[in-house]
Amino acid sequence: MTTARARRVLDVPLLVEQASGGDPAHRARAVARLISLVEDASPALREVMALLAPLAAHARVIGLTGSPGVGKSTSTSALVAAYRRRGMTVGVLAVDPSSPFSGGALLGDRVRMQEHATDDGVFIRSMASRGHLGGLSWATPQALRVLAAAGCDVVLIETVGVGQAEVEVASLADTTIVLLAPGMGDGIQAAKAGILEVADLFVVNKADRDGADTVARDLRYMLSLGDRRTDDGWRVPILKTVAARGEGADEVVDAIEQHGAWLAGNGQLEARRRKRASDEVEAIALTALRSRIGDLSGSDALAALAGKVVAGDLDPYAAADELVASVTA
Amino acid sequence: MTTARARRVLDVPLLVEQASGGDPAHRARAVARLISLVEDASPALREVMALLAPLAAHARVIGLTGSPGVGKSTSTSALVAAYRRRGMTVGVLAVDPSSPFSGGALLGDRVRMQEHATDDGVFIRSMASRGHLGGLSWATPQALRVLAAAGCDVVLIETVGVGQAEVEVASLADTTIVLLAPGMGDGIQAAKAGILEVADLFVVNKADRDGADTVARDLRYMLSLGDRRTDDGWRVPILKTVAARGEGADEVVDAIEQHGAWLAGNGQLEARRRKRASDEVEAIALTALRSRIGDLSGSDALAALAGKVVAGDLDPYAAADELVASVTA
């Protein structure tokens, strides 16, 4: 695709208008294109965000995480269905922070989402954090803005894997759900991975299988050790589902809503929203500064500074001062 | 320790003088203290580096890496002995980029280095990259400066683990040695981890064990597939050692010196030195900018910007512009 063609096709104001209102037939496609811009860290994002800002649209953000095989995708689909029964518009972001290929890889899983494919109250997007330095912390808030502007009442962020991703999800989400399943040794692993700290809500999926009660009991025991209640006053519930049959999804949505009401009541919903915006602004600023330095990589200016350092004419801090000065001038 | 006491004890010019000349009895201790300052990202580093710069001291930098259990520590010790027999002063940096506890954890391994403990031509230091944002790329070049100033002709950087660390070692070192051992399935794993690309020299340690020939043959086969020779003209040698008995260490040093001569002959030694300085200056500059942003985390200024973003009065890019402006003013 030539630049000229890209320019002709990319009519940002039209895309934003289509994503945030008007004809539902155009909306899904416009949302998908805008999130692609986020994925690609397109320079056009600046204009996109400037146009979206006055809408001041906000969605409830739900993080859903857990080890591979616990049924995240099936659970997400069941939750989408439960929210739709309540007449709410739902966005789904499936994020893989590590793999540049996840967008494609995840599409296989998305088969389970097909029941929502023709529902114009559902927006589903697999998102890789390729193409930008800030990673998940940079891309996800902007994708959230797009989905909120498209009228999503709720956005489910589903992350793959266990580890750093959970922590990032928790920092983004209003409510973080940690999903487990029997027979995976997750009870003990949950404690190791620090999952106890990030979960606002535990869901033991595949509850029709042997061992579901054991997982729930282990979790309850570990929660009693951690005693989260004294920390912030929210008593982390442990729910059971059979997501493949949709069983328990309504109860999970009830618990999410209860957590939301609790957050709203004590001012944390607003505080988390501000924290999210603050992190987002910080990530964009840091990326901007980093790319200014990056632009100087291999430049004559940096090469000259490095030469002076090698020769002993300049120490690396003094050279860095000059580099920073040239970047911030 | 009170600040007053810390100030009184930390006489930077004296430390630098002791590290870079004078009485060998003081030197080891002064070097150790200076590298502690690097580990802790001490503000005093700026003064340290300014005092070290005019010395324009340079060491040959050798990276040594490989999976746990291949005998990195034993091999390092054998290489130190081989260099000492040639009358050269040697520094050793054992770096664990991931763990904040590695300094302590590695000390157990350092028992094998005890034979060099009373040799004032050898400086050994386990270094964790705790306390600073830039990690290995930030800390190691500065530790190298200290060791070069202390008169080290050669610095061996030993890294733990396989993965990102290798790439960083390779970017720092003049010559990167990848260590393998029979019976660990390393032959195949080497290719997976991209080790073929970073190695200037392969060493199959524990060569008295069954399977050493197989590892060497597999490596040779993989190298023939990669055909590094056409890339940059250096034919990667595969050597065998029994480091625990010191066997083969002299041949490894010969190969390192051959690689050094090859690098010097085609200008790459100087180019790598400049690249190292360039990366170092960049890392310091980026850390400085990042900490300026970090200083604003939780500040009233950032909170006010985030509030405007939540209210829709400002888009996140415009807010980031204001943040960058306040940082670079």
Image (cartoon, coloured by chain):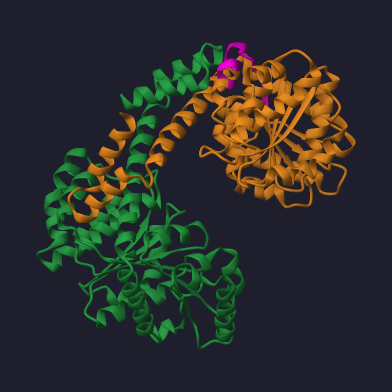
Chain colours: A orange, B green
In the depicted structure, whether residue B244 falls above or below residue B50: below
Whether residue A195 can be seen here: yes
Judging depth in this view, the residue of A4 and A86 nearest the camera is: A4
Q: Residue A109's quadrant in the figure?
A: top right
Question: Where the C terminus of chain B falls, by quadrant?
Answer: top left
Q: Where is residue B194 in the image (x, y as percent from the top left)?
A: 55, 63
Q: In this view, does A122 lie to the left or right of B167?
A: right
Question: Where the N terminus of chain B falls, by quadrant?
Answer: top left
Q: In this view, does B113 lie to the left or right of A268?
A: left
Q: Which residue is depicted at the point 67% across and 50% down? A: A188
Q: Which residue is depicted at the point 12% across and 50% down? A: B13
Q: Position of residue A187 (x, y in %)?
A: 70, 47
Q: Is residue B286 left or right of residue B68?
A: left
Q: Which residue is depicted at the point 43% across and 57% down? A: B168
In the depicted structure, whether residue B89 falls above or below residue B241: above
The mark total stands at 0
Is A59 inside the magenta-drawn segment?
A: yes
Q: Where is residue A68 in the image (x, y as percent from the top left)?
A: 73, 48
In the depicted structure, whether residue B257 falls above or below residue B134: below
Q: Is residue B116 left or right of residue A276?
A: left
Q: Which residue is depicted at the point 40% across and 49% down? A: B135
Whether residue A242 can be seen here: no
Judging depth in this view, the residue of B94 and A184 nearest the camera is: B94
Instruction: Please provide the residue range marked out in magenta.
Output: A48-61
Is A130 inside the magenta-drawn segment?
A: no
Q: Position of residue B143 (x, y in %)?
A: 29, 57
